[in-house]
Amino acid sequence: MQIKRLRISGFKSFVDPADLVIEPGLTGVVGPNGCGKSNLLEALRWTMGENSARSMRGAGMEDVIFAGTATRPPRDFAEVTILAEREGDETEIVRRIERGAGSAYRIDGRDVRAKDVALLFADAATGAHSPALVSQNRIGAVIAAKPAERRAMLEEAAGIAGLHVRRRDAETKLRATETNLTRLDEAIADQD
Ligand code: ATP
C-alpha cells in the first residue's frame, strides 16, 4: 500500500482544509516548533484507528477537534482522509469525529466499522500501531519492550497482525456453533 495524500480538516491545529501530497522523494517535513509537524503524523495514525486519546496527546478523543484560538472559534468536527493506492486501485479512508457524537469511518464512501479500517491497514503491514510510524519517545519504548510486545511489533511489520483478529473472530463463532449443537442434541434427546 502506498499512502499518496492526506486531507485534514478541523483536526488539531489544521482548522482549514489542508492537503499533504506524499510523493516519492518526500523525506521530511520541517517547520518551527509547534507548527503542526507531529499533528500530521497523528492525523495519519488517528485515521488508521488510533483509539488512545493519550497517545494523541489529549485527555479525550474530542480533543483532536480544533479547539479555537483568540481569533478563530472552535470547530464542531474533525475529518481526515487518507488516499492510498493498493494493487493499482485507489482507496479512500475517512475518519470523522463530531462533538458529542463520536467517530465514524468510511472506506470508498461506504460506512464501515473501526475494525474494518484496522484490518485493511494491518493486512498492508501498516496501521496506527505499526512500527513504520515512529513517534517521539517510541525508540525508548522499543528498547524497553518485553519479548511478547516485541513479537507483536514484528508481527505487525510482517503484516500478519490481522490474522490474529480473524482467528479470534473464528474461535468465537466456533464456540457459538458448538453451544448451538449441544442445545440441538439436548432438544433431540428430549423428543426421543
Ligand atoms: P515540535 O517541533 O515542537 O515537536 P510540532 O511542529 O511537531 O512541534 P505539533 O506538536 O504537531 O507541532 O503541534 C502543536 C500545536 O498544535 C500547538 O500549537 C497546539 O496548540 C496545536 N494544537 C494541538 N491540538 C489542538 C487543538 N485541538 N486545537 C487547536 N490547536 C491545537
Image (cartoon, rainbow, N blue to C red):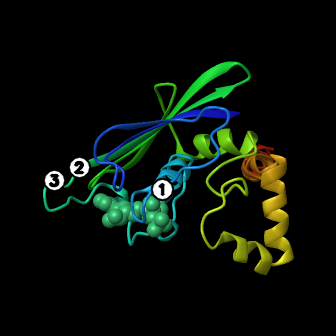
Secondary element type, mark 1: helix
- Quick check: which quadrant has ligand 1? bottom left
Tell me where residue 146 sits by quadrant: bottom right
Q: Residue at x 28, y 47 (%)?
A: 15
Left or right, residue 69 beside residue 131: left
Q: Residue at x 71, y 71 (%)?
A: 139
Label 1 or label 2, whichever lies nearer to me, is 1
Left or right, residue 89 beside residue 151: left
Q: Nearer the viewer, residue 62 or 80?
A: 80
Q: Position of residue 153 (x, y in %)?
A: 78, 61
Please name the residue that numbered disc 2 is placed on: 76
Q: Which mark is residue 72?
A: 3
Please report whichever mark, 1 or 2, sits nearer to the chain's N-terminal start.
Answer: 1
Please name the residue that numbered disc 1 is placed on: 37
Beta carbon at label 2 within 8 Å of ligand 1:
no
Q: Nearer the viewer, residue 87 or 108?
A: 87
Quadrant location, the C terminus: top right
Secondary element type, mark 2: loop
Q: Position of residue 176 (x, y in %)?
A: 72, 50
Dot 1 crowding, Cα within 10 Å, few <14, some 14–19, many 20+ = some
Find the distance from the CA under tag 3 to the CA under tag 2.
13 Å
Q: Amino acid at mark 1?
A: Lys
Q: Residue at x 51, y 65 (%)?
A: 52
Beta carbon at label 1 within 8 Å of ligand 1:
yes
Residue 165 lies, with reference to residue 134, above or below; the image says above
